[in-house]
Amino acid sequence: MEYTVRARGLFMSTDTKFPREVIWAMGLVKYAAARVNTELGLLKPEVGSAVMNVARRLMNGEYDGEITVDVHQTGSGTGLNMNVNEVISRHVNTEYGINAHPNDHVNLGQSSNDVVPSAIRVSAVKSYLDSLRPALLNMIRVMEEKGGEFNNVVKAGRTHLRDALPITLGQEFSAYIDAFKHDLSLLDSVIDYVKELPIGGTAVGTGINTHPDFGNRVVKVINEETNLGFRRANPFRAMRLLTDLLTLSSILRSLSMDLYRLCQDIRLMFSGPFTGLNEVDIPTQGEVAGSSIMPGKVNPVTVESALQAVSTVIGLDEANMMAAMLGEFELSMGIPLMGYNVVRQVRILTETMDKLSSLVIREMRPNVERMRHYAESTSALITLISPIIGYEKASELAKQLKEGHSIRDILLKLGYTEGEVNRILNLEELTKPGIKLRGINK
């Protein structure tokens, strides 16, 4: 552990450690490299077998506590690679009685410059496919179910936070469903790009000091272990540039923005219960006290924690932009930070969507009468019904509306029957396309 011990004094000490996903991916690359080198006759079978066994245990999480280097380290990730090499070497030596050198055997045919860029991509792809993609699909499914329930729940539309024409809660949900579907499509597309691995490029992309078939064969083993369809990259590009991962991060940012807007809308609809909109109820939000001093107060706690979570994802994207800019010529200098951040973004968004879909969206209860009252009281209806009831009556209606009367009550006072008012204020019809100028003149 000589390198790892000395590195602690030179790297940052921020207590920021690599997540399980990155350590797993590093173990997978080391396992695949040892297997390929053994098959190529470059490692003795007993050494290769021992390295593979220990690498497998690293993948399974047995040595996570021994990966101690800080994320903020040498830009290529040499600190992480050497930490992993030394952990594997030490366990091979002590547990198998075999002399396995960190560089000569564990790192045979490799460089930190191709290993770590490959591992962080493997961890990003697997994290997305295992956790974030299912969470996003579930969010879409839950919103479609609830959107169907809310298709006929009419509410006041609002633009600039001012009265606008009626809309249904289902139509508002459809905006986010469509946005999330586009986010999913974009993520799937960029993940295919991230699947390109530069392993086999060694120090500068040329593949010096490794077998010509090493890179392709390592990728094949990785695919046998994961069944995720990784491919060999142009190593000169994938070692020098992290723009594929930055693109992934930017789409995670877009998803975060869509979630942010959804949460803001929910907070406003949930505001109240007496001095806010009070358009929806979310019973789960009352499971913890909303205030330490005001008894009975209920806050949108899950929604607010989600807003903070997606704010972190957006901030990490800014850090990723800077990380992607680090470096010159043949190598990026932001590799460990990018690897850490992307996995963190995926984790945060997965948790956010799981909690929002199960505790907020699924449990949402519309206050139908309250919504309808707002929809019937919106001043935007005056313009719409002016051609129906005439300009003079519409002007009178506007004056009374400002005094707090509902449009329904005012129309009844103007002499319209209940049936005629229902025809004029057919809010469900007003949420559909078409020209609504024909009506009743009195």
Image (tube, grey):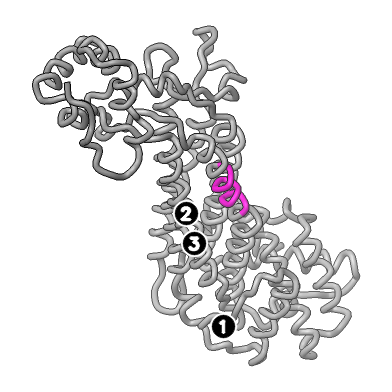
Dot 3 or dot 2, earlier in sequence? 3
Distance (Cα) linking label 3 and label 2: 12 Å
Task: Examine the rendered structure and indicate whether residue 132 appears above or below residue 302.
Answer: below
Seen at 21% across and 36% down, the residue is 437
Circle 1 — which element? loop
> Are the two marked residues, 3 and 2, in contact with CB atoms closer than 8 angstroms?
no
Counting from the top left corner in percent of width and height, residue 407 is at 26, 18
Amino acid carrying mark 2 in the image? Leu
Counting from the top left corner in percent of width and height, residue 420 is at 29, 22
Is residue 71 among the parts visible in the rendering?
yes
Seen at 64% across and 79% down, the residue is 110
Q: Find residue 201 and name its label.
A: 1
Residue linked to disc 2:
252
Q: Quadrant of residue 370?
A: top left
Q: Nearer the viewer, mark 1 or mark 2?
A: 2
> Are the two marked residues, 3 and 1, in contact with CB atoms closer than 8 angstroms?
no
Task: Examine the rendered structure and indicate whether residue 265 appears above or below residue 123.
Answer: above
Q: Nearer the viewer, mark 3 or mark 2?
A: 3
Please say whether residue 135 is one of the residues in the magenta stretch: yes
Dot 3 or dot 1, earlier in sequence? 3
Seen at 60% across and 25% down, the residue is 284
Task: Examine the rendered structure and indicate whether residue 412 appears above or below residue 339.
Answer: above
* 263 and 207: which is toward the camera: 263
Amino acid carrying mark 3 in the image? Ser
Distance (Cα) linking label 3 and label 1: 31 Å
Q: In the image, is 12 to the left or to the right of 327?
A: right
Amino acid carrying mark 1 in the image? Gly
* 166 and 22: which is toward the camera: 166
Residue linked to disc 3:
185
Is residue 264 among the parts visible in the rendering?
no
Magenta residues (range): 134-142
